[in-house]
Amino acid sequence: MDNIRLIVSGGGTGGHIFPALSIANAIKAKCPDAEILFVGAENRMEMQRVPAAGYRIIGLPVSGFDRKNLLKNIAVLWRLMKSRRKARRIIRDFRPHVAVGVGGYASGPTLKEAGAMGIPTLLQEQNSYAGVTNKLLAKQADCICVAYEGMERFFPKEKIKLTGNPVRQNLLEATITHDEAVRTFGLDPTKKTILLVGGSLGARTLNESMLEAWEAIKESGVQFIWQTGKYYYEDITKQLSGRELPNVHVCDFISSMDAAYAAADLVISRAGAGSISEFCLLGKAVVLVPSPNVSEDHQTKNALALVNKDAALYVKDADASRELVSLALNTVKDETRLASLSANIRTLAFLHSAEVIADEVIALAERYKKTH
């Protein structure tokens, strides 16, 4: 296979960056000579994460629309125009054979310009409710890879490929046993363990729910691995000083998620698309608390797609401080319920998503090269 050049664009959150890197790695595995250039948003997380993974990235001055303060969008439109001009220059200089968009506002200008210049484009939509950027780009896209059924509500049916979401490779290759994993957190392998994780930045509601239910947690005999997020860690450790911590491991960030998942009998989490894909592949029983702060309430729709198949439990953010911990404690002690949640969520898993998407990308690039 000849050398192919491709642009991967998008980002803003880990939920966009992990799939983008997984796709790039899968393409490299199939085409070691492929030249891959990432295009992201300046000052966002991808500007560090992508170079750390060994890829070159160029940032655009693009930013998201402010839905609350409409006057601020004058500056947003100006940055969007500048970003489209810069994207056009990048495409002209790099001369890609295909452009891949993983969502997030950085992919808008890049994919729009690539399509206008006749470059084939592929979109990857992680959520069960399509994002604004991908909906706008869908008309000119050549292929749209999705993780949920029923996405013809948003995209032309003939362009849709049901591939699932790529996940972090190291999670699938983990060899650590449950008992070893529990011990790495200083906990007891004979006791039930709940993992509470609110994403890399943490989740205020999940943290407050833990503090509210502290007496119940202490008396439950159930252990917790509690990732507070870096933003909340200092405040929470202050609040916990002087309290007994017999059965809770508190940390700001978990670097070895493979061990955390292996240790957990039950997970409490936000409902980001990437996290849900990981729970499906690993067959984890999970209580989802969708974030109310995401555009178009994506996370609630992601959660309900699982709840409707009895593959997850769900607590509204507004009800979490009252209901979340007691639901989790009751569920983790119910072996039959845990087993059925685990079995049901596993049926929704897609294996080899990154490889399947990589094949689509390579096919588009090869087709373009033949005709040009």
Image (cartoon, rainbow, N blue to C red):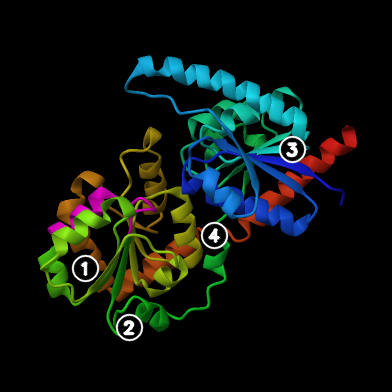
* Mark 1, residue position: 330
Q: Which residue is mark 4?
A: 168
First-in-chain label (1 vs 4): 4
- According to the image, label 3 marks what residue? 98
Relative to 234, is 93 above or below? above
Q: Amino acid at mark 2?
A: Pro
**Mark 1 to mark 3 CA distance (whole Å):** 50 Å
Counting residues from the start of the chain, the first of labels 2 and 1 encountered is 2
Residue behind mark 2: 189
Crowd rating for badge 1 (residues with CA inside 10 Å; few <14, some 14–19, many 20+): few
Instruction: Give the percent coordinates (x, y) of residue 231.
Output: 30, 50
Asked if residue 202 lies in the magenta stretch, the reply is yes
Binning the other alpha carbons within 10 Å of mark 3 as few (below 14), some (14 to 19) or many (20 upward) gives: many
Considering the numbered disc 1 on the image, is that residue within a helix, a strand or a loop? helix
- Name which residue type carries label 4: Arg
Seen at 63% across and 60% down, the residue is 352
Q: Secondary structure at mark 4?
A: loop
In terms of secondary structure, where does tag 3 sit?
Answer: strand
Give the mark toward the camera: 2 or 1: 2
- Left or right? Give the position of 76 relative to 368: left
